Image: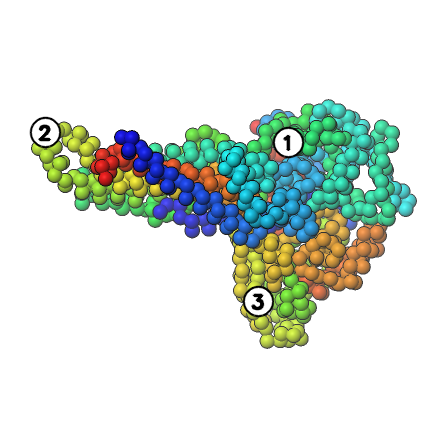
Amino acid sequence: MLLSRSALLPIWHPRGPALLCAAPTEGSTDVTLTSACTSTKTIRRTGVAVLTAGVFVLSGCTSSSTPEREGTAADTTATTAAPTPGGTLTFARTQSPTSLDLHTEITANNAFAIDKIFEPLLSFNAQGEIEPWLASEYSPSEDGLVWTFTLRPGVRFSTGDLVTPEDVVYSLNRHIEVGGPLPLDAPITSIEASGTDTVVITLSEPYTPFIAELAGFSNGILPADLGGVDEATFFKNPVGTGPFVVDEWTEGGDISFTKNVNYWQDGKPYLDELVYKLVQDDNQLVAQLQSRQVDVIDSVASANVATLEGNSSLTVSTTPSWVVEEIFFNTLDEHFADRDVRRAVSYALDREGIVAATSFGTAEVAGSVLPPSVPGYDATIDSLSYDLAGAKASIAASAYPDGFSTKLLVASGNTLRAQEAQIVQAQLAEIGITVEIESIDLAAFRERFRAFDYSFMINSATSDVADPNGIVSFQADPEGGTNGYWTHYNNPEVTALIAQGRTLPDGAERTAVYSEIQATIAGDAPFIPLSYPSNIKASQATVQGLTVLPNGSVRLQDTWLTK
Amino acid sequence: MMNGSLRWLRRTALRVVPVVTGVVLATFFLLRLVPGGPAAAALGDQATNEAVAALEAQMGLDQPLMTQLWSYVSGIVTRGDVGTSLLYGTPTSELIAGRVGVTLSVVALAVLLTLVLVVPLAFAAALHKDGVVDHLIRVVPAIGLAMPTFWIGLLLIMVFAVNLGWLPAGGSGDGVRSLILPAVAIAISMTPVLVRTLRAQLLEVLDADFVATLTAAGLARGRVLVHVLRNAALPTLTLFGLNIAYMIGGTLVIERVFALNGLGALMFESISNRDFPVVQGVALFCAVAVVAVTVATDFLVDRLDPRSRLS
């Protein structure tokens, strides 16, 4: 019979569990990467990757000859040709938005539509540096408790109404009230409007990640009282200050936007229209790009990168992301409760080999729980990297010197994870650990780890902010809400350091705290970071000025089309 | 005649009611037996268990199973309402209405293409029994049977969309043009079995006494073949009907390969996200459609074959 169900398997690959979040960052001075072009240097390169990096995106980088080009993905304004206004950009994405309520959503399908409509007071650029956005200026009081934000003059909603301090107060209060999956965690005691252009926010104690949190898409500004309509109506036809306005939205299908004619950045957006087209399959993404049905594809499977790079009418962009691909241990598991067992696993895994075999040169070998694109990343910590003798010594010192049998949980339909799991299985056999791979549907996978019903698993973590506090809080702080990202990791020493890191002002002392946190976590090995994947996008060569942010979103107000 | 219609109605009802009831109950319970829920999918891996529980309560999933079943069933029976998507907040019927056009268009085009391919090929093979043409017709389409549909789809995309650029690679934004490749892919995989069935039946009927009689009576060859087809078509028609019924619920693979946003894609997405009401709604819709197609096929067979009405 035709269309047999088994035929499903080969094409069944929803994205991995890593659809996650978007979000903001904090402006920190010690960002290690200064431009997209140079930052790609940190990415493991094959010759191919070098080419890509050069070509990428940058309006400035029009040819692929050298990787060290000037201009950055972030600053597309420095371009050789003047942007041409007009045209429609068709942007293919693998998931369609389900809701545009910025306070209740977190997943990428919603986040990267929401951030085209609503904008926060502050934002972050391609390097994760905080920059003024709807607020043109901001400053803290001496004690770091009172923050004053000055609204940029002349910012209007898409309806033409001026943004007032009352709108800001309403927006942030609604967020605090709703809470949501990306809450404003800062200890805010009051948000007050003052005069015609000032908002004053008071904290109960110093909280350094505040600015980074505020730059998240979920702190976008909307009209006070939703402009007088009910929530359902408002979020079907939302009003914000962003570069685009929802035009047509088919639930579960495409969503199209028209340019916001009242946008505050002069002459932008260049595009007249933007269409997010739903294309759910990796092969289709590539095929539709190759046949010029779409202009940009939101993700490229690493296995497809080389094919696309070989096509001169296409441009592939590989930029640093805030994602970390990791092995997570259930520290309540009888075997993995033993620190020596976890350390033995860490030593036994050849991460260089795993990354080389699975990423096709698009990912970097990981050591720390923080990705290099987040400030505070420390490349010098001892990450218990591949050392078979060390692995054997650790397992000998553990409660299971003769090894044991266990199960590795992975979500099915993710080719990358399946490959990683097989390599892990083979490498752990070397130290007497017999691994059975258990591959289950994504929703079931989530239910299992949420119930701590697993031994160890492969998943990814995503920072929501360019501040180290975000990722270490949810991965290592028992109070972080997810019990150490479903590992039940609890080291009071680390917990105390995390609390200290939140209050210390940016500077050497704070950086040292995060170095210590990263080193201690690596030593305890509740998770083993495997790789730092890149954001990979591909577009027609006619698409200029795609600014890819480290959370995976794209600033489309800067984008234009050459004829 | 009255008697016949009544019998037909009764037979139809006997099929529809148990199938629909079975599908409603099976999808309801199976979905809830499978681990994983919609709230965890919507909130992401970083959401706390409290947040997930709160959203589940808001979705009404904390209610006892029987309460949920009652509200689902009573919704269908009293209002024809199959529920509201937990993910989109829109009625399932609207989501289905938005998608069904694409699926049915592909199926219809595939059916048409298959018919156009099958009838002449089967005749050509039967009339040249054991000749070169017969062998070719039996062997070449079998290649289509041997390849999985998704693979045929990928090949068609590579050749006709990416390399030649004649037709779109996927999506449904291009009208009929965007439906051609998916329909061809389905037709290629449906044709072989149907050609062989029809060929075998044709051969059988060509040997029948009435053919010799008609030919001897001097009836034109074309007229004779019409009678042959009418007699030979019945088993093929039944098989064809089953295939169509299967396709309505089974275009998922083809929709996925060609990025068509139809019922299959909706089903796939809703299962992944555990959007219970939508999965239930689509399953119910497909069940009704399948029953409708089989009933229609039987009706057609009845019309074509007066003998079955006598029994």
Residue B256 screen position, x and y as percent:
47, 42
User: What residue is rendered at 63% in x and 57% in y?
Assistant: A451
Residue A190 screen position, x and y as percent:
85, 40
Q: Amino acid at mark 3?
A: Thr
Q: Amino acid at mark 1?
A: Lys
| Residue picked out by circle 1 | A236
Camera sees residue A209 = yes
Q: Rate crowding at label 1 as few (under 14), some (14 to 19) or many (20 or more) other CA atoms within 10 Å.
A: some
Between tags 1 and 3, which lies in front? Answer: 1
> Do discs 2 and 3 belong to a common subunit?
no
Q: Amino acid at mark 2?
A: Gly
- Above or below: residue A426 compared with residue A250: below
Residue B90 screen position, x and y as percent:
58, 35
Q: Are marks 1 and 3 in contact (CB under 8 Å)?
A: no
In the rendered view, does B121 fall on the left or right side of B149? left
Name which quarter of the figure residue A163 lies in: top right
How far apart in space, not on screen, are marks 2 and 3 (Cα)?
A: 80 Å
Secondary structure found at label 2: loop
Name which quarter of the figure residue A409 lies in: bottom right
Asked whether B195 or A152 is in front, the reply is: B195
Q: Rate crowding at label 2 as few (under 14), some (14 to 19) or many (20 or more) other CA atoms within 10 Å.
A: few
Q: Residue furthest left?
A: B216
Secondary structure found at label 1: helix
How far apart in space, not on screen, are marks 1 and 3 (Cα)?
A: 48 Å
| Residue picked out by circle 3 | A406
User: What residue is rendered at 44% in x and 40% in y?
Assistant: B286
| Residue picked out by circle 2 | B218
> Do discs 2 and 1 belong to a common subunit?
no
Q: Earlier in the sequence, mark 1 or mark 3?
A: 1
